[in-house]
């Protein structure tokens, strides 16, 4: 699984669980984790690093 796919999957799972859980502290931690994954995803996409391979602009 490519890193981008993994991050997107983790974001989806964390956000879905945060909506379903009753404990606010746990929900906040899940939302924070999703935000961390989004930041890493944006950084990965920005530098063009997909599936561990650096992609050169042509």
Image (cartoon, rainbow, N blue to C red):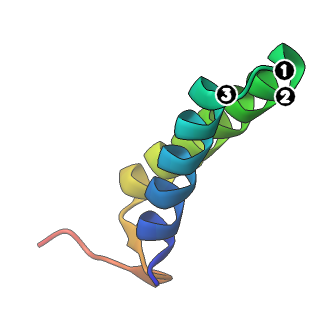
Name the residue beneath numbered marker 1.
23
Tag in front: 1 or 3: 1
Q: Residue at x 44, y 55 (%)?
A: 8
Q: Quadrant of residue 50?
A: bottom left
For residue 47, above or below residue 51: above
Residues packed near mark 3 inside 10 Å, few (<14), some (14 to 19) or many (20 plus): some
Tag in front: 2 or 1: 1
**Which is nearer the N-term, disc 2 or disc 3?**
2
In the rendering, at what x and y percent does residue 26 appear? 84, 28
Residue 31 image label = 3
In the rendering, at what x and y percent does residue 42 appear? 45, 44
Q: CA distance from mark 2 to mark 3?
A: 9 Å
Q: Is residue 36 left or right of residue 10?
A: right
Q: Quadrant of residue 32?
A: top right
In the rendering, at what x and y percent does residue 57 appear? 19, 68
56 vs 34, nearest the viewer: 34
Residues packed near mark 2 inside 10 Å, few (<14), some (14 to 19) or many (20 plus): few
Q: Which of the image's four quarters has the C terminus?
A: bottom left
Q: For numbered disc 1, what is the local secondary structure?
A: loop
Q: Is residue 30 left or right of residue 1?
A: right
Name the residue beneath numbered marker 2.
26
Tag in front: 2 or 3: 2
Q: Residue furthest top?
A: 24
Residue 55 image label = none
11 vs 20, nearest the viewer: 20
Q: For numbered disc 2, what is the local secondary structure?
A: helix
Is there CB contact under 8 Å for labels 2 and 1?
yes
**Which is nearer the N-term, disc 1 or disc 3?**
1
Q: Quadrant of residue 55?
A: bottom left
């Amino acid at each position: 699984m490519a890193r981008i796919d993994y991050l997107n999957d983790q974001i989806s799972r964390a956000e879905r669980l945060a909506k379903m859980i009753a404990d606010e502290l746990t929900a906040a931690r899940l939302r924070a984790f999703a935000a961390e994954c989004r930041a890493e995803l944006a950084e990965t996409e920005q530098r063009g690093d997909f599936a561990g391979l650096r992609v050169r602009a042509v």
